[in-house]
Image (cartoon, rainbow, N blue to C red):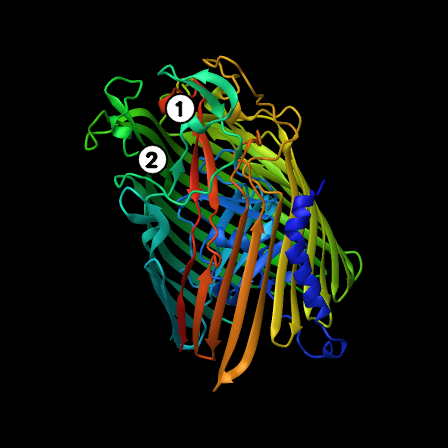
């Protein structure tokens, strides 16, 4: 693995901050009782100290989430080493861990599973839970297929909700008022139900106008009309050894039109030479740094992401003398729609398309994955004091998903005319999967432990909207082997190897009977070593992990003749090498520093063909390119939509009892993410991202008032750049590519008020 000088220079502020904070620790102060608070996680489906789990995990407590203003997956990625994130207005959400990005961008199945209380969410849209009543968020790195199943190919993100408290009446109310008409109100209420049960009611709503000017309408985009969350959680202990949890929640989203700017084909400056359908010579690609979009020009007829996620589960736990039995049944339901203006030109309605009677004013109707899923899990785990630790269980999953995509063009000169379909695709898939799983831990000595986890899955996918009853079947093993050495109470070393599996699917835009109609599973083996340390009498914790990922049979998007969208096929191999550090330091009694850094090298292996570049490079079956100027073979290049370097650093200084019983804290955060390339060609970069946030708060036992600013220096940045065939310019046959640039939020600020009672 090579580390370039640019990455080292970018990391200099982070390394300097750590060095400065360490130098501030006076020897005489080390004896003070300033130990960092222990965090308990459930990543291995049992409660354990974060520092005792032989896995790379980043965890955020309730206080972390509040003071870092973490509202969405995008915010989470800002502060989590080796986690990166991109989406389209809340749809096709793509969290990627350790460079294993979603190469098939529109697939309903992601590379990182998102869970609430261990229940998998069966979609990739609307996964924003900033208003949910959370106790913490856990990000587990590396494949978790052995314990969680196929949906954790690169890792898992688990939102852990607060547990109702027995015998306690109380709650909280929290509100935000900010710039760009940002408002939110949320809260919870804990109500005892006798001596053995309690119910917690929670809910909230928010709205935000966004920060990106839309010059056509004079309004701003990038925000949401409303986001609502409401639900309830019941917890009961009917006997000394029995625990019951019931949960129900609805998360609604009504986003504004996606803020995006589209490039003109005339800006393409590299690739191949071609001629568009109107006889105008073009180049197929853009090379260089994409402009940072500061405004957009979009039709008000387009529609943002609208829909909802529903989640219901029931959980029963019973302690026997020798083991604990856990049974979990869940139901999830989701449905979303999204319509995107892909012309971004007020005169597009008057420009003729190459199909007579139509204009180049196009809309993409992306009804993102929707459907329902039921899951049932039962497991028996040995008691904590067992000489040999073990778990055995079974799991059944049944889902029904509808995924539609359509490209439409409006009649020439008629902005109010009926959109004419140019291409439509619909996938209606039923998935049934049954798994058995287990784990075994054995202590060779008081310090040395080995464990093995194994899951076997039998899965069937059926394409419901097929005339011939198409189906695919998969069965696979997903193991993980771990060895850990507890050198002393403050130092853990570990190594593990695990296999991730992501099953295949269907390409309904390819005719039945063709080989390209289906695609198969992709796999990875991840090898990880790491350490977890407690230093300076508990005042500093540091976790370090290094990994190598061997990724095979990637599910890759490839161009399809006479179609504006691509199909997915399995092709080629990739690998990712990296190292990450996550540390927290109580510098003094009142000064806390947290820092994280990840250096990665995610790379395609030799012979890999970038399917999204075959048309642009003249390697497409029906190409009309005159002079090819590139090659779709991208072995040795950085994996698209991944970054090779990230760091973040934050510091909080507290002034106790600044007045009466109020403490004041001042917090500053800075994060950096190096550039991403929009395709495996590595020709065009969306640029790096540098964001600074600040917060000043006044807090006592019951009340907190905090003033905050995000993106303090008002930096322009691109949250995503996507290359797509430029249909109005005859793509994919002409090879001309267009770029959709999604700008990030500019500076915002506001005040939070939180009342506990």
Asked where in the image residue 548 lies, by quadrant, the reply is top right
Q: Which residue is drawn at 47% across and 77% down?
A: 699
Point out residue 310 in the picture as x, y percentages from the top left corner.
36, 51
Position of residue 114 in the picture relative to residue 341 (left or right): right
Q: Residue at x 39, y 54 (%)?
A: 312
Give the residue pinned by disc 1: 509
Point out residue 124 in the picture as x, y percentages from the top left corner.
44, 43
Q: What element carries label 1?
A: loop
The quarter of the image holding the C terminus is bottom left
Point out residue 145 in the picture as x, y percentages from the top left corner.
58, 44
Q: What element carries label 2?
A: loop
Q: What separation in Å lies between label 2 and label 1 (alpha carbons)?
A: 26 Å
Judge whether residue 505 can be spotted in this image: yes
| Mark closer to the chain start, 2 or 1 | 2
Q: Residue at x 45, y 62 (%)?
A: 709
Asked where in the image residue 708 lies, by quadrant, the reply is bottom left
Depth check: 233 or 599 in front?
599
Q: In this view, does 204 lie above or below 719?
A: below
Point out residue 282 in the picture as x, y percentages from the top left corner.
44, 20
The quarter of the image holding the N terminus is top right
Q: In this view, does 544 lie above or below 539?
A: above
The label number, if any, that marks residue 172 in the structure image: none
Question: Looking at the image, which residue sits at the far bottom?
Answer: 660
Give the residue pinned by disc 2: 344
Badge 2 crowding class, 10 Å Cα cut-off, few under 14, some 14 to 19, many 20 or more, is: many
Q: Is residue 495 above or below residue 386?
A: above
Position of residue 158 in the picture relative to residue 168 (left or right): right
Depth check: 278 or 422 in front?
278
Judge whether residue 38 can be spotted in this image: no
Depth check: 250 or 705 in front?
705
């Amino acid at each position: 693995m090579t580390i370039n000088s640019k990455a080292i220079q970018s990391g200099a502020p982070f390394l300097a901050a750590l060095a400065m904070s360490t130098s501030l620790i006076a020897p005489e102060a080390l004896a003070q009782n300033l130990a960092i608070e222990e965090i308990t996680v459930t990543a291995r489906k049992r409660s354990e100290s974060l520092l005792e789990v032989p896995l790379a995990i980043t965890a955020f407590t309730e206080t972390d989430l509040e003071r870092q203003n973490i509202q969405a997956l995008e915010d989470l990625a800002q502060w989590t080493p080796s986690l990166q994130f991109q989406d389209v207005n809340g749809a096709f959400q793509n969290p990627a861990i350790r460079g294993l990005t979603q190469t098939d961008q529109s697939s309903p199945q992601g590379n990182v599973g998102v869970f609430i209380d261990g229940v998998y969410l069966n979609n990739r849209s609307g996964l924003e839970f900033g208003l949910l009543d959370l106790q913490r968020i856990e990000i587990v790195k590396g494949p978790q297929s052995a314990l969680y199943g196929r949906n954790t190919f690169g890792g898992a993100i688990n939102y852990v909700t607060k547990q109702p408290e027995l015998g306690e009446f109380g709650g909280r109310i929290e509100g935000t008022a900010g710039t760009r008409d940002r408002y939110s109100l949320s809260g919870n209420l804990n109500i005892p139900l006798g001596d053995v049960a309690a119910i917690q009611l929670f809910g909230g709503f928010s709205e935000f106008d966004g920060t990106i000017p839309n010059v056509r309408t004079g309004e701003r985009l990038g925000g949401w009309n409303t986001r609502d969350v409401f639900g309830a959680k019941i917890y009961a202990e009917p006997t000394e050894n029995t625990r019951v949890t019931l949960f129900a929640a609805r998360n609604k989203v009504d986003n504004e039109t996606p803020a995006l700017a589209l490039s003109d084909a005339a800006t393409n400056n590299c690739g191949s030479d071609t001629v568009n359908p109107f006889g105008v010579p073009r180049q197929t690609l853009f090379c260089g740094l994409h402009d940072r979009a500061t405004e957009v020009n979009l039709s008000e007829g387009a529609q943002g992401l609208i829909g909802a996620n529903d989640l219901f589960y029931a959980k029963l736990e019973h302690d026997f003398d020798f083991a604990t039995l856990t049974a979990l049944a869940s139901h999830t339901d989701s449905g979303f729609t999204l319509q995107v203006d892909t012309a971004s030109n007020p005169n597009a309605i008057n420009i003729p398309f190459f199909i007579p009677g139509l204009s180049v004013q196009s809309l993409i109707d992306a009804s993102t994955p929707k459907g329902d899923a039921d899951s049932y899990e039962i497991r028996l785990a040995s008691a904590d004091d067992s000489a040999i630790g073990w778990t055995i269980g079974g799991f059944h999953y049944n889902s029904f998903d509808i995924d539609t995509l359509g490209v439409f063009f409006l009649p020439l000169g008629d902005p109010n005319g009926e959109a004419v379909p140019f291409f439509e695709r619909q996938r209606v898939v039923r998935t049934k999967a049954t798994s058995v799983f287990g784990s075994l831990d054995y202590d060779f000595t008081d310090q040395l432990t080995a464990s093995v986890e194994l899951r076997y899955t039998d899965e069937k996918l059926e394409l419901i909207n097929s005339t011939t009853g198409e189906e695919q079947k998969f069965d696979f093993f997903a193991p993980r082997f771990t060895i850990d050495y507890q050198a002393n109470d403050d130092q853990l070393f570990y190594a593990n190897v695990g296999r991730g599996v992501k099953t295949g699917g269907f390409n309904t835009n390819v005719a039945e009977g063709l080989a390209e109609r289906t695609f198969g599973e992709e796999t990875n083996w991840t090898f990880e070593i790491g350490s977890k340390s407690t230093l300076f009498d508990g005042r500093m914790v540091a976790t370090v992990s290094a990994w190598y990922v061997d990724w095979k049979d990637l599910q890759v998007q490839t161009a399809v003749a006479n179609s504006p969208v691509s199909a997915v096929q399995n092709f080629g191999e990739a690998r990712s090498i990296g190292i990450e550090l996550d540390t927290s330091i109580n510098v003094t009694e009142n000064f806390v520093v947290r820092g994280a850094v990840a250096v990665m090298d995610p790379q395609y292996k030799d012979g890999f063909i970038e399917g999204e570049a075959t048309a642009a490079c003249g390697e497409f079956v029906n190409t009309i390119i005159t002079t090819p100027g590139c090659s779709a073979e991208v072995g040795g290049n950085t994996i698209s939509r991944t970054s090779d370097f990230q760091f973040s650093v934050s510091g909080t200084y507290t002034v106790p009892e600044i007045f009466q019983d109020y403490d004041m804290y001042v917090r500053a955060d800075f994060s950096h993410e190096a550039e991403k390339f929009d395709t495996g060609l590595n020709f065009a970069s969306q640029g790096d991202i540098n964001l600074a946030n600040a917060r000043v708060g006044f807090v006592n036992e019951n009340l907190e008032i905090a003033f905050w600013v995000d993106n303090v220096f008002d930096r322009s940045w691109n949250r995503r750049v996507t290359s797509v065939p430029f249909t109005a310019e005859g793509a994919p046959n002409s090879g001309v590519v267009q770029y959709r640039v999604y700008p990030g939020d500019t500076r915002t600020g506001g005040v939070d008020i939180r009342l506990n009672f």
